[in-house]
C-alpha cells in the first residue's frame, strides 16, 4: 500500500494480463530481427566459396569474409547493448535495421573485394543488435510463460537458417551470389517498415522512473489482450533519481545539454563496469566462457558441414560427398536439426531448469561428435552432424534465455550484449582454427578440439551460482552486496 492506495508491480501486471495478442505482435517484430540475423549468418556458408571461385580469392581472403562479419558483430553487440540500456530498446531498432539493411543491400552490389569486406563488416555491426531484440521480448513475458515463449522466440532463428539454406539452394545455382545477399536484407527492411508500431519496453520505462509512460503501455496491452490490470497504482523499485530532470537554471540551456550528454555518457560506461561488481562478476565471467564455447561449437558445426560437403576429396578415406549439390543439401538437412533442438530445449528448460538443460544438451552434442574423430560414411557423418547441431541449438537457445534473466534491467542489454560479443570472438576464431584443421586433413584434431570446448561449456553451465527458472526479472542490483 502507498498512501492508503493499493499498488502493484510490473510482474504482477503482466501475470494478470497473461500472454495475449499484444505479446504476439511484439514476438513477431522482435523475431523478425532474429530471422534477419540468422539469414545473414547462414549466407556465409555459401557466399565465401562462390566469391572465391568468381574472383579467384585465396583461402585467407575467403575466410576474411566470414571473420569481418563476426568482428562487426563483436563491436555491435557491445555498442547496441550500451545504447539500449541508456536510451531505450525502441531507439535501437531504427538504427540497427538501417545499418543492417543498407549494408546488406550494398554488399550485393559490391564491385570489388574490398568494398564487399567493408559492407559485410557493417552488416555484422548491425547484426550485433540481436541481443536487444531478445531482451526486449523477454521484458513483455509473464514469469510463468517465460521459458516456453523464449524457446518459441528462438524458433525465428531456426526459421531464418532453414529459409536461407532453401534460398541458396534454389537461387545460387541458377543466378549468382549477389541475389541471396540482396534477398537476405529483406527482413531488415521489414523492421524499418513496421518500426512505427513498436512500443518502448515498460520495464525499461519503470527502471527509468517513468511509471506513467509504462502504465499507458500496460493499459494498451490490457485492451489488446482483453484483460484487466490489477487495481491500484503501478510502482517501480527503481529510484526516480534516474528520471529525466530539468536543468537547474533555465538561463543556461547549452550547459544543461552538455551535462545531460555527459551524464548519459558516464551512465553508459557505468552499466558496463557494473558487470564486474563483486556480486555478479563470477556470473559474468562464466557467461563469457559459456557464450564463447557455444558460439565456437555452433558455428563450427555449421562450417564443418560445408567443408565436409564441399567436394574436396584430397583427404584419404574422406567422408565427403561428391555431388555438386551436396553443399546445399547437407546444409539444408543440418539446418532442419534446429527444429528438434528447439523442441528438446522447450521440454527441458522449465522442467529441469536452465543450468541442467544446457549441461544435458551439450553432453548429447559430445556424444554425437565423438564418432567423427575417425572418418565415417557420408550418410553417417550427416546424421551425426544433425544430432550434434540439434543439441548445440538447444544449448544456445537456453543460454540466450538465461543470459538476460540473470542481469537487472539497468544492465540487461549490456550484459547480454557483451556476452554475445564474446561469443562472436568464438565465431571469429572457429573458421580460422577448427575448420582450417579439417581443410588441412586434420579432422580428428578438429573434432577433439570441439569436444574439449564443449566440456568447458558444460563445466561453466554447472558452476553458475543460481538458477533463474521461476524467478522474477530484477530491475536493479545492489553493487555493494557481496
Image: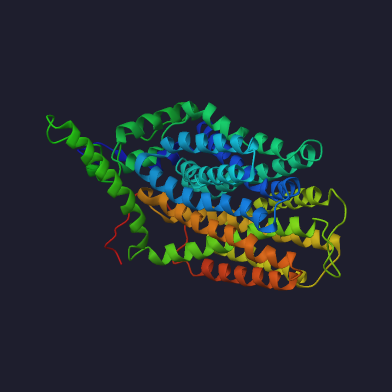
Q: What x and y, as percent, mark residue 407?
A: 41, 54
Residue at image location 82% in from the left, 60% down from the top: 312
**Is residue 192 something one can see in this rendering?**
yes
Q: Quadrant of the N terminus?
A: top left
375, above or below 194, in the image: below
Looking at the image, which is closer to me, 418 or 360? Answer: 418
Q: What colour-coding does the image apply? A: rainbow
**Is residue 353 something one can see in this rendering?**
no
Residue 380 sits in quarter: bottom right
Looking at the image, which is closer to me, 459 or 43? Answer: 43
Residue at image location 75% in from the left, 60% down from the top: 385
31, above or below 398, in the image: above
Q: What x and y, as percent, mark residue 15?
A: 45, 41
Looking at the image, which is closer to me, 440 or 443? Answer: 440
Residue at image location 85% in from the left, 70% down from the top: 316
Q: Is residue 135 left or right of residue 183?
A: left
Q: Is residue 197 left or right of residue 373?
A: left
Residue 375 sits in quarter: bottom right
70, above or below 108, in the image: below
Q: Is residue 257 left or right of residue 136?
A: left
Q: What x and y, as percent, mark residue 440?
A: 74, 68
81, above or below 253, in the image: below
Q: How many marks?
A: 0
Residue at image location 71% in from the left, 35% down from the top: 179
Q: What x and y, as percent, mark residue 55?
A: 72, 46
Q: Quadrant of the C terminus?
A: bottom left
Amino acid at each position: 500500500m502507498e498512501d492508503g492506495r493499493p499498488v502493484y508491480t510490473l510482474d504482477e501486471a503482466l501475470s494478470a494480463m497473461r500472454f495475449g495478442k499484444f505479446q504476439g505482435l511484439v514476438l513477431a517484430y522482435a523475431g523478425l530481427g532474429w530471422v534477419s540475423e540468422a539469414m545473414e549468418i547462414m549466407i556465409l556458408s555459401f557466399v565465401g566459396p562462390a566469391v572465391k571461385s568468381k574472383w579467384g580469392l585465396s583461402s585467407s581472403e575467403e575466410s576474411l569474409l566470414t571473420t569481418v562479419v563476426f568482428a562487426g558483430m563483436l563491436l555491435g553487440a557491445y555498442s547496441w547493448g550500451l545504447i539500449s540500456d541508456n536510451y531505450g530498446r525502441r531507439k535501437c531498432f531504427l538504427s540497427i535495421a538501417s545499418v543492417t539493411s543498407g549494408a546488406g543491400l550494398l554488399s550485393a552490389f559490391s564491385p570489388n573485394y574490398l568494398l564487399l569486406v567493408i559492407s559485410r563488416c557493417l552488416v555484422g555491426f548491425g547484426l550485433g543488435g540481436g541481443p536487444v531484440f531478445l531482451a526486449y521480448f523477454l521484458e513483455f513475458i509473464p514469469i510463468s510463460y517465460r521459458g516456453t515463449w523464449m524457446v518459441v522466440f528462438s524458433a525465428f532463428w531456426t526459421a531464418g537458417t532453414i529459409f536461407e539454406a532453401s534460398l541458396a539452394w534454389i537461387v545460387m545455382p541458377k543466378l549468382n551470389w549477389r541475389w541471396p545477399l540482396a534477398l537476405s536484407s529483406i527482413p531488415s527492411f521489414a523492421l524499418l517498415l513496421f518500426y512505427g508500431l513498436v512500443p518502448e519496453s515498460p520495464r525499461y520505462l519503470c527502471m527509468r522512473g517513468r511509471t506513467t509512460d509504462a502504465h499507458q503501455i500496460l493499459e494498451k496491452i490490457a485492451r489488446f489482450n482483453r484483460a484487466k490490470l490489477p487495481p491500484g497504482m503501478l510502482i517501480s523499485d527503481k529510484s526516480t533519481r534516474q528520471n529525466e530532470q530539468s536543468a537547474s537554471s533555465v538561463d543556461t540551456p547549452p550547459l544543461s545539454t552538455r551535462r545531460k550528454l555527459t551524464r548519459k555518457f558516464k551512465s553508459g560506461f557505468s552499466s558496463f563496469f557494473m558487470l564486474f561488481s563483486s556480486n555478479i562478476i563470477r556470473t559474468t565471467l562464466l557467461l563469457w566462457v559459456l557464450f564463447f564455447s557455444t558460439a565456437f561449437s555452433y558455428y563450427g558445426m555449421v562450417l564443418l558441414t560445408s567443408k565436409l560437403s564441399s567436394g574436396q576429396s584430397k583427404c584419404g578415406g574422406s567422408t565427403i560427398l561428391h555431388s555438386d549439390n551436396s553443399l546445399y543439401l547437407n546444409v539444408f538437412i543440418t539446418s532442419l536439426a534446429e527444429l528438434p533442438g528447439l523442441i528438446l530445449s522447450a521440454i527441458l528448460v522449465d522442467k529441469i531448469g536452465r543450468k541442467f538443460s544446457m549441461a544435458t544438451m551439450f553432453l548429447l552434442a559430445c556424444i554425437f561428435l565423438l564418432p567423427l574423430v575417425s572418418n565415417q560414411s557420408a550418410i553417417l557423418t550427416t546424421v551425426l552432424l544433425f544430432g550434434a547441431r540439434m543439441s548445440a541449438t538447444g544449448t544456445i537457445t537456453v543460454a540466450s534465455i538465461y543470459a538476460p534473466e540473470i542481469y537487472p534491467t539497468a544492465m540487461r542489454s549490456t550484459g547480454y550484449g557483451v556476452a554475445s560479443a564474446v561469443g562472436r570472438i568464438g565465431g571469429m576464431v572457429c573458421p580460422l582454427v577448427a575448420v582450417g584443421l579439417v581443410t588441412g586433413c586434420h579432422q580428428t584434431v578438429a573434432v577433439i578440439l570441439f569436444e574439449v570446448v564443449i566440456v568447458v561449456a558444460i563445466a561453466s553451465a554447472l558452476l553458475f551460482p543460481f538458477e533463474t527458472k521461476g524467478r522474477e526479472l530484477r530491475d536493479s542490483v545492489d553493487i555493494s552486496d557481496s
